[in-house]
Image (tube, rainbow, N blue to C red):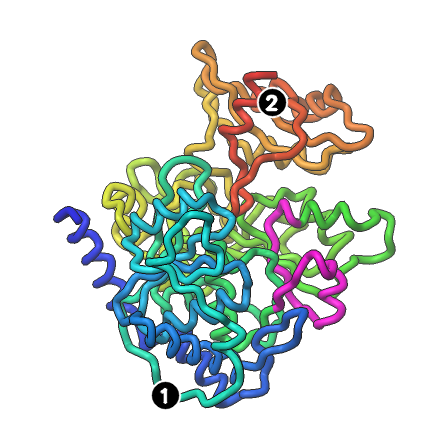
Amino acid sequence: MSGDHRLQRSRIMKSAKAIALNGVIVDSIARLASSHPRRIAVIRDCGKTTFAELDGHARRMAGWLAGRGLHPGGMVGITLQDEYDHLVTCLALMYLGCSQITLAHNEPPAMRSALASRCRVSCVITNDMPCGQSTGDALIPDFEEILADGPLGDKSPGHNNPEAVVLLPSSGTTGRPKIIPCTQEQLFRYGLQCLPELSVILGPASIESNVGKWSHLANLARGRTLVFRDPLRSSLAETCRRHGVTLINLAPSQALSLLREFDSESEGPAFDGVRFSVGGAPVPGALRQEIQRRLTGSLFVLYGATECGNATEAGPETHADHPDSTGRPLPGIEIGIVDDAGRALPAGEPGFIRIRGGGCATGYFDDEEASARAFRAGWFHPGDMGRLTADGMLIFSGRGDDMMVLNTINIFPAEIEAVAAGFPGIRDCAAFPLRSEAYGDIPMLAVVPGEGFDSRALLDHCRERLGTRSPRKIVHVDHIPRNAMGKVMRRELAKLGGAS
């Protein structure tokens, strides 16, 4: 490890230690296990698990791992597809004072291996050993045996290790992923305090994803119930009815898929009374209207980042007047807009978004240059563009590096997508630039066409509303390529646009 790397990591860990409390996540679950032992923590197709049972399972797993040499300060990888086994292992490592990182089972073995090496993982807890890989650095637990009822043994396997972190690798569209270290306290503060206390939450995002991991942990620590659904065994609607789901977390692409499952002429919203939290990518006004009309009137649109969790929220009462707003800052979060020199801009002026709050990360794991760019003077700078309205609503314009420049005209993909979304015959769409030495970025629009779609009519529709910012061409595609967080992979679209 280089001297610069050690210095940077030391600064990050010291900052984490300064805000860390005693194991916030596992301590909260232990208190719930004691004060509300019969409250349901997790619902699966095979049955329900109380907080007392969950805490007991995490402690048993911690004991099993300790017996195999894991100790405070270690860095451990997790490759477990089963949601509950992964959750229990994650909590067990927190009890042991170990740091951890998910090495997702659906990533290629070479990618997992590179990430494990980069993070200096000492062992991997897995039941997904690739053919030919040595088991010397792997632990393969028998969960049925470990979690079976029996003497619990030591009731206090926990170690207060404030330097233990959960590493969350970003799901960027290209390049080397950034790795965000988060303490239990930071995860707990990730913008979930405003949800109803006794929510029953269904989140299609796997616990192997960043948003799945931090939201599962933070919601459990607040006493909420998680529902793990096997999509092969039951539909989302069936799961909601059977288990009394009160809140569903979705990416916009998942909401679009859900809309296709329900008849647009059906009477009333299909999930009436269920709260939908939609985020991870822009949610155009037309999509909001369809969700409210056909799925649920209780729609909340979120904006945030892996580095800070949820930052703003727009509720049902705001969508009509502010159809493209991501809402106001959540409690404990401050939003500012600055120019490219870091100077604060007044309301109405577009610029770069910056975020400040007690739960924000303070740097990246092993990238001093990226940390210096993104974390400055107590603010996190995600690289997104936007503006604040006079009454404090955030209007998201898109990624700064997504901005197109056509003959000095700045064009954001989000403004094109907002106009195109909801046009007859469009199943999905995304704007992207086609590079030109003469003109700069030529705006294009990729469309997944449905029945009755008319490309020429859409181009005319966009020109009437966007003028020179309208797309010059419509490219038909089978699907819009997105990363694990639902963000459009525009470079992939540019390859298709250049070849068409």
Q: Nearer the viewer, mark 2 or mark 1?
A: 1
Name the amino acid type tagged 2. Pro
Q: Residue at x 51, y 48 (%)?
A: 106
From what the image shows, is residue 425 above or below residue 96? above
Q: Residue at x 29, y 42 (%)?
A: 370
Could one spot residue 75 in this view of the protein?
Answer: yes
Q: Quadrant of residue 471?
A: top right
Marks 2 and 1, Cα distance to the nearest angstrom?
65 Å
Tell which of 280 and 172 is nearer to you. Answer: 172
The answer to whether marks 2 and 1 mark residues whose Cβ atoms lie closer than 8 Å is no
Task: Examine the structure image and report whether residue 371 is included in the region drawn in magenta.
Answer: no
Please state the extent of the stretch shown in magenta in the rendering: 227-254
From what the image shows, is residue 79 above or below residue 433? below
Place of residue 351 in the rendered image (x, y in percent of width and height, measured from the top left)? 41, 38
Q: Residue at x 55, y 57 (%)?
A: 206
Q: Residue at x 12, y 48 (%)?
A: 3
Q: Neighbour class for label 2 at 10 Å: few (<14), some, many (≥20)?
A: many
Name the amino acid type tagged 1. Asp
Identify the mark at residue 423; answer none if there is no mark.
none
Place of residue 477 in the rendered image (x, y in percent of width and height, measured from the top left)? 66, 28
Identify the mark at residue 471; answer none if there is no mark.
2
From what the image shows, is residue 221 above or below residue 471? below
Q: Neighbour class for label 1 at 10 Å: few (<14), some, many (≥20)?
A: few
Q: Quadrant of the C terminus?
A: top right
Mark 1 — residue?
154
Place of residue 368 in the rendered image (x, y in percent of width and height, measured from the top left)? 23, 45
Q: Is residue 273 left or right of residue 151?
A: right
